[in-house]
Image (spheres, grey):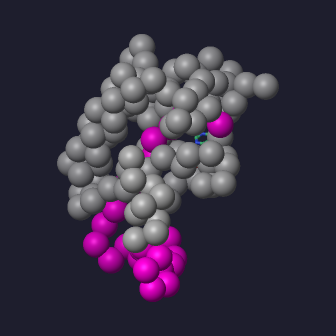
Amino acid sequence: MATVFEMIINGDIPSVKLYEDDECIVILDINPVSKGHALVISRRCYPTFTDVPMETLSHMMEIARKVDSRQREVLGAEGTNIMINNSPASGQEVPHLHIHVIPRFPGDGKTPAFPKEKYSDGEIGEYGEKLRI
Ligand code: AMP
């Protein structure tokens, strides 16, 4: 079944589009974390960050940086969260690769985004051993 983003790309449902090229489109998120929250969406449907070719991802990051600049210029954002939810366990709702670009303002009350955990004694080293690439 087509994802909601495929339907948007195919013109089957409306969106507010900020940019498009051969690799990706940028739209406004319909339920923004803050107004102006944008999504850089790959034209081809790669379900996750793990699936997308590096060249496409790299291009999408370049476009995300342009969106960041525009949000700073036009909205006066003093920061942005650039975020990819990668697979359902991370909170990804739409299985079609997209980068969130969320405008942020001092004192906007939207942090901390994640509650933090604590390592027990020695545990951080064990994680380091297991995860070293
Ligand atoms: P994620 O949880 O990372 O998969 O994010 C999916 C995002 O898509 C959410 O922030 C939704 O608010 C957004 N979204 C879902 N449907 C639409 C739509 N029709 N137009 C714009 N944004 C949408």
The answer to which of 89 and 103 lies nearer the viewer is: 89
Which quadrant holds residue 14?
A: top right
Which quarter of the picture shows residue 20?
A: top left
Query: Taken as a whole, is the magenta stretch helix, strand or loop?
Result: loop
Residue shown at 20% from the left, 48% from the top: 73
Picture quarter containing residue 3? top right
User: Does the rendering let one see residue 14?
Assistant: no
Q: How far from the left and from the top, in percent, is residue 94?
A: 65, 40
Indicate the quadrant of ligand 1 in the picture: top right
Q: Position of residue 46 (x, y in %)?
A: 58, 27
Tell me which residue sits at (23%, 61%) in the image: 78
Residue 73: tell me if it is visible: yes
**Looking at this rendering, what residue extends furthest in the bottom direction?**
121
Left/right of residue 89 with respect to residue 24 in the rendered view: right
* Image height of 86 relative to 49, above or below: below
Q: Residue lying furthest right in this view? A: 1
Question: Is 79 drawn above or below residue 11 in the view shown?
Answer: below
Residue at (27% x, 40% y) in the render: 65
Please name the residue shown 28% across and 32% down the image: 62
- Locate the N terminus by quadrant: top right
Which residues are drawn in magenta? 95-124
Residue 104 image position (x, y, % from top left)? 34, 62
Please tell me whether residue 1 belongs to the stretch shown in magenta: no
Q: Position of residue 115 (x, y in %)?
A: 51, 76
Q: Judge by depth and name the residue closer to the eye, 4 or 28.
A: 4
Most foreground residue, 123 or 100: 123
